[in-house]
Amino acid sequence: MRFFMCYFETTRECNQNCPGCMTRLDAPARPCLTTGEAKALVIDEAAKICSTG
């Protein structure tokens, strides 16, 4: 399997309402990840899938 792209939203606090954007302020609130959680759950996992850079 080839890993092509990883999309990670760093915040849901945007109020720009850009067309096509999936971030919505009216979405149910979820707890924010800490930097360590984001690294472990997103960055480190993506690196495992795409270990060649």
Image (cartoon, rainbow, N blue to C red):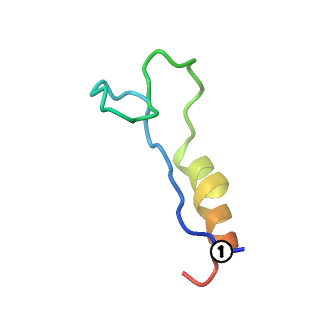
Instruction: Give the image location of residue 38, x and y in percent.
Output: 57, 50
Q: What residue type is labelled 1?
A: Arg
Question: Which quadrant does the N terminus fall into?
Answer: bottom right
Using the image as rendered, state which of residue 21 and residue 50 is in the foreground.
21
Instruction: Give the image location of residue 31, x and y in percent.
Output: 59, 27
Q: In this view, does 14 lie above or below 38?
A: above
Using the image as rendered, state which of residue 21 and residue 9 is in the foreground.
21
Q: Quadrant of residue 43?
A: bottom right
Instruction: Give the image location of residue 33, x and y in percent.
Output: 57, 39
- Count of labels shown? 1
Tell me which residue sits at (65%, 74%) in the image: 2
Tell me which residue sits at (53%, 63%) in the image: 5
- Taking 19 as reference, is 30 left or right? right
Q: In which quarter of the image is residue 50?
A: bottom right
Tell me which residue sits at (47%, 15%) in the image: 26
- Taking 21 as reference, is 6 left or right? right
Callout 1: helix, strand or loop?
loop
Q: Quadrant of residue 16?
A: top left
Using the image as rendered, state which of residue 38 and residue 24 is in the foreground.
24
Instruction: Give the image location of residue 44, x and y in percent.
Output: 63, 64
- Taking 31 as reference, is 49 left or right? right
Residue at the extreme bottom of the image, as rendered: 52
Please give the residue where the numbered disc 1 appears in the rendered image: 2
Question: Which quadrant does the C terminus fall into?
Answer: bottom right
Q: In this view, does 33 lie above or below 45?
A: above
Q: Is residue 31 above or below residue 45?
A: above
Q: Is residue 47 above or below residue 41?
A: below
